[in-house]
Amino acid sequence: MAKSRIIVDCDPGVDDAIALLLAFASPDEIEIVGITTVNGNVSLPLTTRNALRITAMAGRQDIPVYAGCSRPIMPGHPREPSVHGLDGLGDLGVADATHAAEHQHAVDFIIDTVLREPGQITLCPIGPLTNIALALIKEPAIADKIKSIVLMGGAVFSPGNTATDAEFNIWIDPHAAQIVLSSGIPITMFGLDVTRHATLTKERFDRLERDATPIMKTAIAMMRYYGGGDPSLHDPCVTAFLIDPDLFKGVDATIDVDCDPKGAYGRTRATLVKSGASKGQPVCHVITEVDDERLFQLIDRRLRLL
Ligand code: BDR
Ligand code: CA
């Protein structure tokens, strides 16, 4: 399998942090060309600070971090306390980085990178899709130059986690999600349908804790804080897929996002299509199943390498 060259677009966020650490620990399968940050779990200054803190913690200051959009396309909802803590990384006092974010805006970094390497870059959004949507609006020519998008977001066959029918990343910026999901770019979607099965259990914590390295100890403390409110490791499913796609199974569908504030705002509605039978339509591969035992074995094995 060829190594994926990726941009991780994120809002760290504890599970975003674990997704990044898993990618750092997998250099044979994944090369991160840049990390872009977006408003989401916490405000943009905090998601950027956290991306820098995670790269510093893992000694990966060589990976550039670019700050992106500080609000959704349409005025958003008031921020509420979340499972990620006030600082976004479980309020554990994770050390601040001594390096800074790049000066270029995340949207311009995405555009420039894709134009420079047509067909080579996979985008991995694991937060609200604002940066990706704005990149597509600012430079539509990138759409057929992006190799693929592997994203965490949505809830197609299962209930939401933020509103009755809406998953958090889509609910924060449904307009951006609609732009991305109708773009025609090949998309693999990890929604709550699958990520709800990536559950942190007592046995899995016990296994991670055995002979844990210093970085793992911090990761486990973050996950313990977060797991008190949300037992699912959503975002690491995206980076795990790039390491071992056979862990997952899905179906093909076209996706529409409800953007009506009076409707099921943020809901992702699917129309199933037969594989290969949908010429011209923007089809998304909606992941529905995971071998969760093997997924957690992978996370455990890889985090030990950091
Ligand atoms: C998604 O929302 C955030 O809280 C997580 O980081 C994840 O990306 C799950 O709904
Ligand atoms: Ca996230």
Image (tube, rainbow, N blue to C red):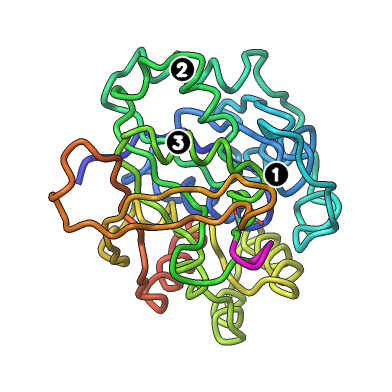
- Disc 2 from disc 3: Cα separation: 14 Å
Q: Is 204 above or below relative to 97? A: below
Look at the numbered disc 3 and give the secondary structure of its residue.
Answer: helix
- Residue beneath the point at 54% across and 15% down: 108
What is the quadrant of residue 270 in the picture?
Answer: bottom left
- Disc 3 from disc 1: Cα separation: 17 Å
Amino acid type at image mark 2: Ile
- Looking at this view, is 222 or 157 the one in front? 157
Please tell me the numbered disc located at residue 111: 2
Q: Earlier in the sequence, mark 3 or mark 1?
A: 1
Q: Is residue 222 magenta?
A: no
Please tell me the numbered disc located at residue 82: none
Residue tagged 1: 40
Amino acid type at image mark 3: Val
Chief secondary structure of the magenta portion: loop
- Looking at this view, is 215 or 242 the one in front? 242
Look at the numbered disc 2 and give the secondary structure of its residue.
Answer: helix
Left or right of 120: which side holds 153? right
Residue tagged 3: 180
Find the magenta span and give its range: 161-165
Is there CB contact under 8 Å for labels 3 and 1?
A: no
Number of labelled discs? 3
